[in-house]
Amino acid sequence: MEKMVYFLFRGFFLSSLMLCQNAFSQTKLLSDSLFKQPPQPKIQFRGLFQGRYILGLHDDVDVLGRHHATGDFVNNSFDLKRVRIATTAIISDRTEVNILLNLADFKSDPENKVLENAYISYRINDYLSLIGGQFRPAFGLENTFPIDVIKSIDFSNQYTAFGNNGWESFQVGAGLTGKYEGAKMPISYALTVFNGNGRNQVEDQDNGKQVTGRVVLGLSKKHQLNLGLNGGGGKVFKRSVYAAGIDLTSDFHLAGKFSFEMQLEAKQGNNHVLYFNTDSALRPVNINDVQMRGWYILPNLRYAIDYHRLSSIELSCRYEEFDPNFKSASNKRQTFVPMISFEFLKNYNARIQLALQIDRYSKQIPNTTTYNNSLCIIQLQSRL
């Protein structure tokens, strides 16, 4: 009997000890999960330098493209185009904060300049991410990649015009993006809403907002053939405005080390900046009578030479037509930009670009920038 009591007591004691040990372990795990410090953010710094020399090839046009009937003017100049510092803080596996500054904006009036990107993004899942702050909204092809990797010397004329009207370049707002990797056709999509009056503004210029949407269809993975569809609408000073566009990109591997890339884009929309800047007695009653339209094609032939530090040589030539007011006062601008680019290291970390920019207008206006001109540009680029 005593032995039986002994074994029962011993079993009870060991069982109690095991239960206490297990409870202690669970309490410790809970305590660790409650009081454990979150991982420190990972901060990445990047930089971009773009310096250039510009030479005007016309006797009566300066380096900014302005015609001078009389007087002295500058027809050649060194210039700091962009000196950027970028910071990305990875807060978690789902959250990032991005800040981008262009210090070259200090060379002129820095008001409403310098700060370019300042936004936070949160990835909900593989199909949906949220973004808010100051960023480039999802509209148009050129809004989808940075200036340092473009296949020409600069963005197109239509990018500048649509940016001035609030559809492209840096805007303040919020949006969502996502993608679906379908077996036959991958799809990416984005929807954004923003003030539409540019970067670094104290507040919106009115109570209206602009909304854009973009869908990209992957037509061919082999040739990286993608079709982009863009649309936008909104209110500016209680007037309804719109913008629409379509773009196509491809990348074909040719024989050996040659590859051929192609970009094609066309856009149309209200030029409400021009409309509201025109005297009320002279402008049309209907804002839809003042519309801009443009298209460009940009072929690029790349040869991956991989000779010492020289990675590749690229030849491109952008041809563009843009009309800021094709309905009421048409004056088409044709632009040719042939360029040869030498890439050193990888991913354009070092790059030398030699280009011509040739502008031709249907109607020239003396003593303005709406005048035929030709520029020779030599640009040095370094990505840090």
Image (spheres, rainbow, N blue to C red):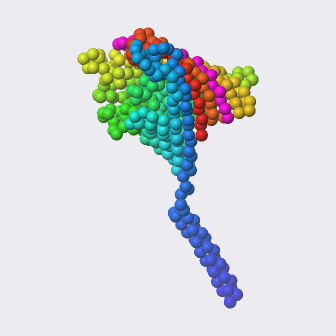
- Give the side of residue 211 with respect to residue 342, left or right: left
- Magenta span: predominant SS is strand
Single out the residue that lies furthest toward the bottom. 2
Residue drawn at 44 percent across, 10 percent down: 362
Q: Which residue is drawn at 51% across and 23% down?
A: 76
Determine the residue positioned at 56% across, 42% down.
46
Residue at screen point 38% across, 36% down: 111
Could you say which quadrant of the image residue 166 lies in? Answer: top left
Number of dots carrying numbers: 0
Residue closer to the observer: 353 or 253: 353
Residue 332 on the magenta span: yes
- Residue 25's spot in the image, x, y percent? 60, 69
The quadrant where residue 219 appears: top right
Q: Can residue 234 be seen in this view?
A: yes
- Percent across and percent down for residue 113 are 42, 36
Pick the quarter of the image with the C terminus: top right
Specify the segment rendered in magenta: 327-345
User: Does the stretch in magenta take in 325?
Assistant: no
Residue 261 seen: no
- Residue 36 in percent (x, y) is at 54, 62
